[in-house]
Amino acid sequence: MTAAIAITTSGGFLLVLSVLLPVAGIILSLVTGGRYASSITLGLTPFGFALACAIAFCVGRTGNPVTYAIGGLPPPLGIALRADGASAVMLVVTAMILSAAALYAREKFTTRRGGGESRSALTFWIMLQAIWAALTIIFVGGDLFNLYVALELLTFAAVPLVCIDGRAETLAAALRYLLFALFGSISYLLGVALFYGAHGTLDIQLLAHRVEPTPVVWTAAALMTAGLLAKTALFPLHLWLPPAHANAPAAASAVLSGLVVKGSFFLALRLWFYVLPELPTGQAVAVLGGLGSAAVIAGGVLALRQARLKLLIAYSTVSQIGYLFLVFPLAAGAQAWSTIGWSAGLMQVVAHAFAKAAMFLAAGVLAEAAGHDQIAKLGGAARALPLTFLTLALGGLSLIGLPLSGGFSAKWLMLQASVASGQWVWSIPILAGGLLAAGYMYRVLAPALSDGEISMQSPPRRCPQAVALALTMIALALGFAPQAFFDFIEIGRPLVGAS
Amino acid sequence: MSPSTLAGLVGATLVGLGLYGLVLHPHPLRKLLAFNVIGNGVFLVFGIIARRGAAAGLSFDPVPQAMVITGIVVAFAASALAVALILGLYSEAGRVTLDPDAWTKPGPEEGK
């Protein structure tokens, strides 16, 4: 890979289109109102998916990142958009999960013919598209300040989704989320200021060539990382996540847990593996790995103690986010094992996104049909809602890391990397997290499969159940991902071609 | 002490004071004000970088100033959203607290 300044490559305009598409949808929805917002969003999702696939195709065909210099000005004067293998995969995953969430929410947030428009419907569809736009910019952005703005857009789109029903409890959860996120964003911004002051550019590729292990670079990296950890809800900054994700409507929870926390995690990957890969980061990545291990254990233990299904799934997200941060020690450097660690990390991001989105959607079906989601009162629910509990069980399979699921591939690769690199200490949280996940999944499935009569308030609808099941099937199918997938996510990663 | 060093120290102090307020004050409105204090400290740091930077041989570097304007707009939007949430919470519950246990005790779902 050459270190040439980014210029527009063939297919670069696809990146611009993929950002503009959801933004155009937002403007159209605002103009036409809540009545048409759902049709606009649902109509745009196939195009967004096609664009993401086209970008992935361009990256895969050339084996190099697709770049676009905005206004024809190359960095440092202009701003570059850049999609490598990892971003292309994330774009496709985002399009798939957002489409699923939109299909699931179609009936709940719709305006009946002849009925009045509801504000929640308009808010839901506009914020869904805003999340899509912000995530797209995060995945293809090549400039740290641009990424800051995208991160803020993501927060401003995610917070209203939490409190869409306007109850006091959800408003408090949204406010907590917003305050944590504000701390995160201002900390990130201070880091950006220091980077610019020290090296005069914020373009990721240019910065990677200029950074040196000076105190100012370490301070900037620490500030940005702390901010991103608050937004990703890594233990001990996870306090906002469970109430926010558990109180949102099911479709929103799926997007928040599956995708939104991955946005800020992706920026942490960008910072440590694209801006700072040449620096000796050994101790810093060990700290991140340690926090990740603590999150795996603490999230799992807290999930075991929850009385509500959605809270349990939310704490399980805290635990699975911990796994993501084990990537930092396991993929650092340019050794043979760091490739395995990188594959494991990306696989965990993708597998968790699908499995967790599916589980939140299934929990939503259950809560709607039964009128509550108290685990203790689920006796006999599996007989009443077989498809929903199949979804929960199969999603749990991937979270636990049982064979032939995406979660298994991710955790197996993580174990391989930890053994190959001699950092066997990381295998303890990897295995303990799987046991804890098995424990909390048992807590859900055992009462549901037992004898008992659960009273159904309304018959379950078929479409949402099918959507959730399809997502969990994808999470399982990831266990069969071929080597080509792992080669693809290496495209554009620094240090791989160089060593 | 040069003016930019002084401004840098003031910026650092503002960030420190704001962080203290953000962590220790329980009331959301005070936390929001503390966030704005941190924000002003960060914007001051951007100002010094614009003064010092001059990467292209100019006496002022315009890029950090452009960033500050964007940053101020973002912070303003964030504050507006937070105030809206605080007001909504007050009109809905009659009090404003971030304590999650305050809401789970009656249990909105259990009444059904």
Image (spheres, helix red, strand yellow):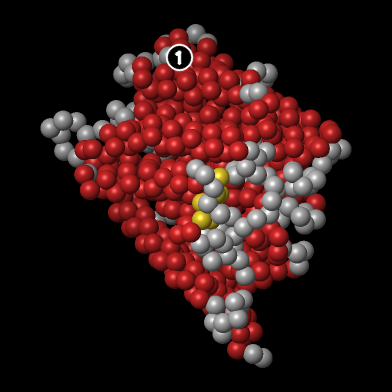
Residue, far bottom? B1
Q: Amino acid at mark 1?
A: Leu
Residue A1 visible in rendering:
yes
Q: State whether residue A180 is above or below residue B8.
A: above
Q: Secondary structure at mark 1?
A: helix
Residue B29 visible in rendering:
no
- Name the subunit of mark 1: A
| Picture quarter with the C terminus of chain A | top right
Q: Which residue is mark 1?
A: A387
Q: Position of residue A182 (x, y in %)?
A: 50, 58
Residue, far right? A422
Crowding around mark 1 (Cα neighbors within 10 Å: few <14, some 14 to 19, many 20+) is: some
Q: State whether residue A222 is above or below residue A99.
A: below
Q: Position of residue B77 (x, y in %)?
A: 39, 62
Instruction: Left or right? Give the position of A86 relative to A245.
Output: right
Residue, far front? A10
Q: Nearer the viewer, residue A442 or A181?
A: A181
Q: Position of residue A63 (x, y in %)?
A: 63, 38
Q: Position of residue B45 (x, y in %)?
A: 57, 75
Q: State whether residue A76 is above or below residue A295.
A: below
Residue, far left? A114
Instruction: Left or right? Give the position of A117 relative to A73.
Output: left
Q: Give the number of marks.
A: 1
Q: Residue at x 36, y 25 (%)?
A: A368
Q: Residue at x 73, y 27 (%)?
A: A412
Residue A132 falls in image quadrant: top left
Q: Nearer the viewer, residue B86 or A377?
A: B86
Q: Residue at x 48, y 49 (%)?
A: A137
Instruction: Left or right? Give the position of A497 relative to A380.
Output: right
Q: State whether residue A104 is above or below residue A72.
A: above
Q: Residue at x 76, y 67 (%)?
A: A214
